Image: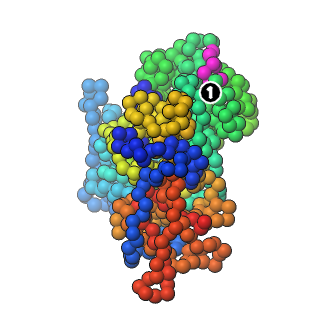
Amino acid sequence: MNTRARSRVPRLPALALMVSGLITACGGGGSAPADAPAAAQPEVAAPQAIAKTTVMLPAQSATVTRTETTVYQDDFESAAFHWGVNAWSEGGSSPQWVVERNTQAANARAGSGSAHFRVDSPAVIFLLDNFTFANGKRYKVTAWIKSDMPAGVELMARGGGPGYYPYAIVRHSATSTWQQVSIEGVMAEDTRLFLTSPTGVNVYLDDLKIAEVKQDELKPQSTATIPDTLFGLHMNKLGTHNAWPKLGQKVIRLHDTGTHWCNLEPQRDVWNFDRMDYIVNHVRTKDPQTQMIYTMGQTPAHSSSQPGATSLYCTSSGESAPPADMQRWTQYVTQVGQRYKGKIKYWEIWNEWDIPQVYSGDVAKMVEMTRIAREVLKGIDANNVILAPSITARLGTQYLERFLKAGGGQHVDIINLHTYEPGSPERMLGSVANVRSIMAANGVSAKPLWDTEGGFGCDPLTQPGCVNASTLGAADLANPLRGLLLLWASGVSNFNYYHWEGGTPTGALVYGTWEDSTPNNCAAFLATQVKYNPDCATPLGRRYAQAVGWLKGAALSERYTTKGVNGRIFIAKMNLAGAMRVVLWSEGAAETVRLFKEKAWFAGTTWDTLKYQTPLDGVGTKQPIPDDLLDGTLTRYRYVQVGPTPLLLTTK
């Protein structure tokens, strides 16, 4: 991300909506921040009077066996043909192509028919025109493909409209021998099946089958203790302040801090490490246990292979291209690797290389730079960890597929994506699942998956037409907890929020310059007049700190949903130091639910009954869970009101 060119803004209420009496508490922390004044009030109303309900939360997740149900198939034996073309003018020439049902048995896998494709000029992509994937469902597509000469062919399920995101994709090396290919993914709105091929190649496709897949999408990828690496941040305005956040962060990513290659070497062989030294030393001084991720790349214009290429960084010309001479890349990686040996452990090859203004080179150059960086950095310190060039979660899946197909996976220790999801964080589930499908298909599913940059708003650069609202309700303030918990359950072990100081008032986790135009009731600021005072967390910042307090050191045992009156209810079971804790929230409006029959959960264990509830209100107001006898019987139940704002249920 580049703050000059775009602004990624979490969808949160504008400060003008915050009534001054409700923001007297300005500190961050765990479930009960020590620096919150005694008079502080929760920003989420206490549960209303409990009404009995027939909705009872299940004690455990249901067993879901994977099934594949065929919903579409075509062996091309019928005269009906349902493939069309999406073509556009490029370079002033009209696109030319062939798309037809082949009737020559020699080019059919079985029988006498197949689909025949040929591109005779650029700007052509083929699509299946009589099937649309359903939003939110998982599908598996299989087909047999061959060509009359070796060619790289891509089969993908791609969305329509601005963005054209590929939700499932395979890059296949087609030959004259029939080979089966498959893709699998969770689809979104208006998703269709597409095929691409290079010009001048006859491609044949046969025995196409599309199956709807049902499986347990919510089962935690790991039941281990949540690692500290999950809690990361960007701090992009160091130098205008010397603060250290009180959010429990254990990772700081250095992207967008003025430390790219083009910043470090503004003139050839003239290096300036002053700012990077300052940032690295600041982090190590404030907390020696906090790890740093250094994002490499952004070639100085004097060493660029494309000096005129549009860029988001430095001079805005040439930095997006790989270097003209790879020896210059080797020298750069050696410089930073040796200077920060033992100080920086995690090394990210490039930022968001699926965006043309960030990377304008090809896949082969990216793989080559990754190989060189690994050799150099591992040679300097065997403990260095290499992160793949990051991709945006939607647009970048095809780049990850191409990178892995070209052998890039063998040179990295961690696969790396970025998530920006407006509205509901639950939308991230499909994006992460689709990246995992690509990892599995390319033999790197055992490698860790990190989300090195993200937020809870949309990104206009990669999500055309999206608009971040400036006034949203309390549900959006719950996104940190929902997002962190969902990412970890999906197997993502690092998330670095972008960014602590914020690009706008709604994105900040700490009050900074915003008090210049809005009254700030934070006593710490009024006393010190220090901007970005870590004791002056915003409403989002307080909830972020509270979310970290709920999750740090806990182990997730189950994650599942049940159907409520107003929508899905998410249930996450955890334990912390031998004590049970459960997090609940719903995607719909608040409703009262019956928790469980006495001791129904964790039957046969030493768990105590859940007795207390704490809302993610930025304060940590713990209250007893109400209970009542059911219909005059001797069976006692407990009730809570569950809505988009998560509840933490504990035994004490």
Write down the residue under mark 1: 279
Q: In the visual, does 636 lie left or right of 279?
A: left
Q: Which residues are magenta?
A: 271-277
- Image location of residue 536, percent across then percent down: 52, 38
Residue drawn at x 64%, y 24% is: 278
Residue drawn at x 70%, y 36% is: 288
Element at label 1: helix
- Image location of residue 574, percent across then percent down: 59, 62
Q: Nearer the viewer, residue 302 or 550?
A: 550
Q: Nearer the viewer, residue 548 or 346?
A: 548
Residue 272 in view in this figure? yes
- Image location of residue 185, percent across then percent down: 44, 54
Residue drawn at x 65%, y 75% is: 605
> What residue type is disc 1 on?
Ile
Q: Identify the image quadrant of residue 642.
A: bottom left
Q: Is residue 272 magenta?
A: yes
505 versus 168 height, above or below? above
Q: Is residue 322 magenta?
A: no
